[in-house]
Image (cartoon, rainbow, N blue to C red):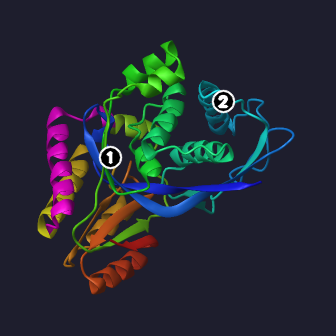
Amino acid sequence: MTKTVRTCGKLYLAGEYSVLTTGQGAILKNISIYMTGEIHFSECYQLFSDMFDHAVDLTPDDDYHLIQDTVAVMDEFLQSRSISLRPFSLTITGKMERDGKKFGLGSSGSVVVLTIRAITALYGLALSADETFKLAAYVLLKRGDNGSMGDVACIAYEDLIYYQSFDRQKIAEQINESPLKQVIAQDWGYVIRRIQPQLTFDFLVGWTKEPAISRDLINQVTSAISSSFLAQTQEDVLRLEKALLAGEKEILKESLEKVSHLLMELSPAIYNEKLRALKRASQGLDCVAKSSGAGGGDCGIALSFDSQASEILVERWQVAGIELLYREKL
């Protein structure tokens, strides 16, 4: 019997660079653009993703190493529950890209969470959002990933969240020294809070159709992060969370403008011309716009508090060559 699961995408509202530092917070929004997984027991293992033009089994493959590593961790997880992994066929569709250009919605985190959900669905196991997050973060940390894991948290929770990062190096060391069951049972020190906004607005995502800045540039940007940047960003991330919860529109707009300005000061690479145009389009309207994620390309976001302002913003984006990728009323 085939089981079908899916995972969403994610985008940062604020804190995308500061959250790389332990104890710093960020706010992320789930995006209802999905990857889908279909899984069933079979005579032999078969993994297929529409990202690639071939299927594989569990023999190491450069294209499928992320999925294969997740399967290996899930094998250990099932064994800890006295369950033996049996051969299955897993098909993944939904590339979160168009014409070979990525949207920047978090595909690697989505793939790991999707594989975890598929295998647990196959065995009829119900995992909480927190358990799913920990398992997915475990997979990535074991692989040497040095990301904040904020994207994984948002994808696992499928919600607008506040996420505060933990000491990933410490947990990675424990992964190398202790059994999975023992590591998963520990308190890692992160914080994840769901946010229920108490005001109505349009959440819009503009896609620049350009790639985000390179890993080398990201490393240059992160090396420029100062204690002042961290302190100011954290203050406004918390102000943003509070404004969302209290329905305080002006404070919300001010805090997003502040974190956007801090990113501009951090590095000119974050706001390329397309993202500057995406932000300029909000001028004179009852809305606020900023880059999202690494910057230099991919997507930017806008929060609009007036339906007419939303239409004008989208028209301005179109003129600037920016595609409305996603829209949701909150």
Q: Which residues are magenta?
A: 222-248
Q: Quadrant of the N terminus?
A: bottom right
In the image, 130 versus 36, the foreground residue is 130
- Hey, what amino acid is under mark 1? Glu
Residue 264 picture location, percent across and down: 24, 51
In the image, 125 versus 267, the foreground residue is 125
**Up-down: is 117 above or below 243?**
above
- Hey, what amino acid is under mark 2? Asp
Residue 232 picture location, percent across and down: 14, 44
Q: Which residue is mark 1?
A: 16
- Residue visible at 77% across and 50% down? 53
In the image, 84 versus 29, the foreground residue is 84
- Secondary structure of the residue carrying tag 1 is loop
Per the rendering, the mark at residue 75 is 2
| Circle 1 residues within 10 Å: few <14, some 14–19, many ≥20 | many
- Residue visible at 40% across and 40% down? 217
Residue 235 forms part of the magenta stretch:
yes
| Of pointers 2 and 1, the one earlier in the residue sequence | 1
